[in-house]
Amino acid sequence: MGGFAGMGDGSRASGAIRWLARAGAALFVISVPLALIGSNVRYLFGEQRLYTFAVNRYDVPAVTGIPKPELIRATHELRRYLFGPDEYLRIEVTDSGGQVGPLFNPREVLHMRDVRALVQGIFRVQEVAIIVALGYPALRIMLDRRRGAYAIASLTWLTALGFNLAAIAFGVTAALGFDRLFTRFHTLSFSNDLWLLDPARDHLVQLFPFAFWQLSAGLLIGMTLLESALLALGAWWYLRRNPRPDEDRQGDQPAADPEPETRSAEAKV
């Protein structure tokens, strides 16, 4: 009876290990795209050259009546706000007439509070996703050596390939109807209508007009596609250069002994 009990415990343990392995693989598949997207969002929001590009490209000094040096300084403060702990955005600027006042009105400030919460939420997801995307392969390879490495490469290849196809489809959809996608994103991401701003008077949309977000979305999709393609290429290269561990082990096994009849015939000779 003790032997049967032990077998039952072993079966349950094996089942639990298989379940954990599958759960880890599923988390890895989800974490890789999230890590790529989140890292690129973090980079783009932190890239000062993108803010400066907006000021120059959309002739913001002429539109707002605020000198370019003041606007560039304001974008530095805006970037720090998105990454920082302050709940509300407070930026004072001096316009072309020498008047000092807030760059953004109360509605814009409240919307930026929502934007900051969303952006920092994406950062937290990215950080967790990176831990999973790096931790699961390390653990799998540590426990299963070559078999684990081959399994991770296979999983990476399938994940990156599937994500690339999805990203291409999303990119085509965005190119054909970015205005609808833009509106849908805001209605899903925010629980209010503070994002509905007036380009004739609200500095936030004068700084970052619709065309800016269209360009930024293209950059995000393009960067993520490139990184995912590189992951797929690296995984494919590994799989091509390394045989499946089961097949490799079979090839290393010593040849089977000859049949008894063959041995007896050789002995007679």
Image (cartoon, rainbow, N blue to C red):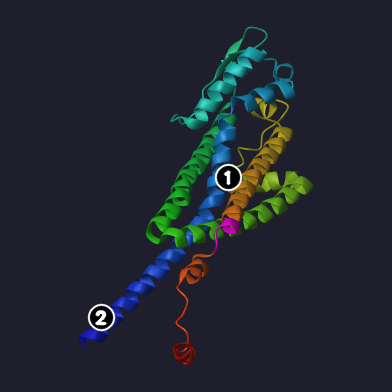
Q: Position of residue 196 (x, y in %)?
A: 66, 37
- Disc 1: CA contacts within 10 A as few (<14), some (14-19) or many (>=20): many
Amino acid on which the number 1 mark rests in the picture = Ile
Q: Residue furthest right?
A: 176
Residue 47 or residue 254, whichever sits in front: 254
Depth order, front residue of 143/227: 143
Farthest residue, direction top: 98
Residue 191 visible? The answer is no
Label 1: state its secondary structure.
Answer: helix
The mark closer to the camera, 2 or 1, is 2
Q: CA distance from mark 2 to mark 1?
A: 47 Å
**Is 130 located above or below residue 140 in the figure?**
above
Residue for point 54% across, 40% down: 39
Q: Position of residue 229 (x, y in %)?
A: 64, 48
Quarter in which the N terminus is drawn:
bottom left
In this rendering, the answer to whether 229 lies above or below 91 is below
Q: Assign the magenta stretch its main secondary structure.
A: helix
Is 234 magenta? The answer is: no
Which residue was labeled with disc 2? 6
Between 86 and 173, the one nearer to me in the picture = 173
Residue 37 tag number: 1
> Seen in the image, is 162 located left or right of residue 147?
right
Q: Which mark is residue 111?
A: none
Q: Which residues are magenta?
A: 239-243
- Position above or below: 255 against 173: below
Q: Would residue 164 be found to the left or right of residue 24 on screen?
A: right
* Residue 241 located within the stretch drawn in magenta: yes
The picture places residue 68, in percent across and down from the top left corner, at 66, 14
The earlier-in-sequence mark between 2 and 1 is 2
> What's the residue type where badge 2 is placed?
Gly
Give how far across and how far down residue 61 sits, in percent.
70, 17
Quarter-of-image position of residue 257 = bottom left
